Each structure stands twice: as C-alpha cells, then as structure tokens.
Image (spheres, rainbow, N blue to C red):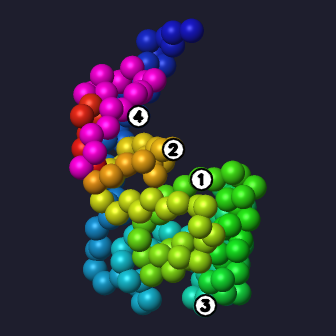
Amino acid sequence: MIPSTGDREAILGRIAEALREEAPRHYETVGKPPAGVTAPFREWLPPVGETTNELAARFAQQSEVLKTEFCECASLAAAAKHVAALAKTGKWKTIALHSGELSTALVEKLPAPIATLVVDKGVALGDQVVIDGAEKLRNGSKVAVSLTSDDAAYKKKAQGTTL
C-alpha cells in the first residue's frame, strides 16, 4: 500500500531532521579513552576475560554458539591424538593449516597417512581453498580451476593459476 501524501511528507521530514544531526564516530577517540581501554573499539567489544581460564571459557561459549567443537587438551600429544581421531572419523586425507608454533608442532605428531597443506600466502578474503588432490601438486605446477559458479570475474582470475 502506498502511503498518503501526508505520511510521505512526515517521513521525509523526519529523515531530513535526522540528517541534520551529525552521527557519532565510534572509530575515533574523542579525548582520552577510559582507563584500561587499549584501543577505541575495545569499549564496545564483548568482554573476553583476563585469565587463561576466562579466555578458554569464553571461547568455548562462542564455539557452542557457532555449533563448533571446542576441546581443551592437556598436552600437544593429546591435541594431536584428538585431531587424528577427528581425521579418522571424517576420513580426512589432508589437513590445511597456516604455519605457526602450535599448528606446526601439532601436525608433526599426526599419523603418517594424513597429509598436510600449509597455506601461508596467496590466499585472499573470499578465496576458496580446495585440498583434494593436493598431494599431487608440486611448486610451479599449473592448475586449471573448474568452477560451478557463473561469476565470470572469478573464473577469469582462477584460469592458469600457478602454484
């Protein structure tokens, strides 16, 4: 239903009035931030806790919300055993990861049939990483990307990708 002219004028008047007011800039600091605030945006982020136990509890809570599994392991060996069990249950052939002190140490403890693919560069936001067949790739290999998407720009970018 189209509003009557009177309603339209009232709505446009309220919009014009709202546009006259300057909106607060949440990303800029006006004056000195409150004590304990290390960056301006932290004042509106949810609390995460100060101790390791509080951080783990908050992470577990968020993991539940996201329908993911959070598992606290007593040691690196226990974590590797847990990941290996997940890999076996899920029939994983390859695990993709970013290199780092913990992730690198963990994958070194995984059983041999599980291959690893380290992705540290060349990936941008929105890129898809496909690891099926990764064990056959070598540095400098040319790959042909087959997409089901109709996105012409993405297809053009993907053609002739070199590792």
Residue extent of the magenta highlight = 140-157
Q: Residues within 10 Å of mark 2 (few under 14, many from 20)?
A: few
Q: Nearer the viewer, residue 40 or 56?
A: 56
Reading the image, the residue beneath label 4 is 14
- Position of residue 154 relative to residue 4, above or below, is below
Reading the image, the residue beneath label 1 is 93
Q: Nearer the viewer, residue 59 or 9?
A: 59
Residue at coordinates 75% horizontally, 55% vertically from top-left?
89
Q: Say which of marks 3 and 2 sits in front.
A: 2
Reading the image, the residue beneath label 2 is 132
Which quadrant of the figure has residue 117? Answer: bottom left
Secondary-structure class at tag 3: loop
How far apart are labels 4 and 2 at the CA level? 56 Å
- Marks 3 and 1 in Cβ contact (< 8 Å): no
Which quadrant of the figure has residue 150? Answer: top left
- Position of residue 153 relative to residue 49, above or below, is above
Disc with the residue nearer the chain's start (4 vs 1): 4
Whether residue 11 is visible to the viewer of this picture, yes or no, is yes
